[in-house]
Image: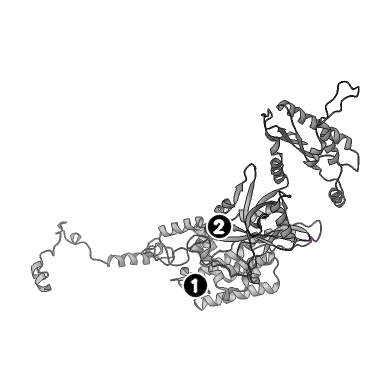
Amino acid sequence: MNGCALLGVPPAHHSLRDVPPPDYTVLHGLRAALEVVCEPTDYQLEISKFIGGPVINRCRVICITSARDNESMNRLEEIFLKVLNQQNSNVSGKDKLLPINHCHLVIINTFPVTIESSVTNHAPKNLSPLLTTEVHSINAPLIPNKLSSLILEHYDLASTTVTGIPMKEEQSASSSANYDVEIFHASSAHTAILKGNPADSAAIRTVKEGLEYETVTLKWCTPRGVTGNELQNCTAMHRITPVDVNSRPSLCLINFLLNGRSVMLEMPRKAGGKITSHLLAAHGGEIFVHTLCTARSVLEDPPSISEGCGGRVTDYRIPDFGLLIKQNTLLPIKAKSSGERLKPLHRVKDRLFRTTKYWPLTITSTLLFNLKQYIDPVPALIVKDEMLDEDMYTCKKVFCNLVALEASMEPLHPQNSGQRMKGQKREEQYKAMWNELELFIRCNIHSKKHKMVYDCLCELHTFNFDEDKANGKQPKDLNETRNQLENIGPTKDENTQRASVIRATTDSPMSPPPLTNLTPPFSRQNSSKGSMYNNHRTLYEIFANMAEKSKTRPDFAGRQGDSLVAKLYPNLKSDDRGPRSDASKEME
């Protein structure tokens, strides 16, 4: 702005002179700006040398001028587009110059305070694939404020106001007053605090009077003595610059930091209390703002699950989830060859999809992974990309041990027994275990040896796949098998089964565990034991069952006589029971 002021006002032309008047149009400045933009910078030359080709040249031109009306402004934009095309045609074919791929023209139209401008503002619009223009019409004294707003937008910056800076007064050195200093820095320095509690973020964001952008207000805080365990980690560091460089508060803050001191900035919370969020310090003669970690420290004990989201669900498989993270950690590696079928990233994604195809989130939703003392190391071997012959032999040995346990009728003892294991029979435990083991191995079949392990399991233990097909049932898919595993426990009636199916398809990990320990009074299996349509029964057994049922209660008296007339309540006036008065006397 000082350089523009030094140019002064163009001199008036005297008509008596024979010298032609100089041309003071703004087009000369715009043409000079485009010529400078075509010259490559050192960074562009470095990138061009690194990639071995031309780089994309984008630019932004800010023009401060004064126009009479919208028509004059539109004519200026059209002339600038014409000059841009001419400049690209002149640059083409020259190795030392770069053509302009895109230009953003920002025109600031100024006018005196005493008049009203006829030029209206307009948002960015595309005049051509090469040019985007926008117009801002403001009073002349507001040019610095407008430039500050454009700087934040163009360079992705943010504003922070450091408030409560104690500084001694010049008149009386014994007293001090609090001052504010505004600084600019990268917008990413506010990411952590603005993504936190919305109420706290709204309390520190304000719009200054006469400005168009928001500033985050943080309070000066004197650092207190803390131990090493209480130190906060620094997550980001960005350079800063004060907005009003020549003001006395800004000079005092800059000198304070350049002398090796540091300033802690704290953010007030709406619910009460304060938290230290940033640190101002100087390194090598430059001042930086440090973003401090406001979350839990890694040195603290992790919170219990009941404290966070999830409610009553407190049985997540945390150790197994940590092992899953280690097995699927992304590491920087080099590809073996350029013609490799799958890139390393795609292989890791495929492996993660395969390993999480069946992975219960909670302890109560699985039985297999609670029997580690019986099935280890099968879960770790099955998820491997390539199995060895020793791994196949180990899996077969585990299957044989499970078959031997089932033959000896030994009950299974899960490590984490919950509600779902109460009231289970040994047959139900083994059936649920075999079904879940078959599902887990089937979801991880991706090689020939994995298929051989699955075939070995089917040979050692007979699954009722053929029987289900003979009865008209389709093989169960993954979701149906999960629903069956959710119903492990005592038998349930039809309404309970429908509720469990709905729960299995709509529940989330935050839903409460199912109440499987409630035993219904009647069940479908019990009601179907005596049915005459059950399979594997002879004709003699059917008639014997019907005859046995007929003896359970006496026949109706009306069917025994020939008169077809039966007397109701035949024992109503019998002598075995006395009147109520006698009965009451006996009770007394």
Q: Residue at x 88, y 37 (%)?
A: 91
Q: Residue at x 42, y 67 (%)?
A: 517
Determine which quarter of the picture holds residue 322. bottom right
Foreground residue among 197 and 231: 231
User: In terms of secondary structure, where does tag 2 sit?
Assistant: loop
| Front one among 346 and 8 | 8
Dot 1 and dot 2 residues touching (CB under 8 Å)? no
Q: Amino acid at mark 1?
A: Ser
Q: Most extreme residue toward the front, as rendered? A: 171
**Residue beneath label 1, please?**
417
- Per the image, the residue denoted by label 2 is 269
What x and y, as percent, mark residue 54? Answer: 85, 45
Q: What SS does tag 1 mark?
A: loop
Taking the magenta stretch, the answer to whether it contains residue 186 is no
* Quadrant in the picture for residue 169: bottom right
- Sequence-wise first label, 1 or 2: 2
Give the x, y percent position of residue 414: 52, 74
Using residue 528 as the reference point, say whether residue 194 is left or right of it: right
Left or right of 327, for residue 6? right
Q: In this picture, which residue range is highlighted in magenta?
A: 333-338
Which amino acid type is shown beneath numbered disc 2?
Arg
On whether residue 334 falls in the magenta region, the answer is: yes
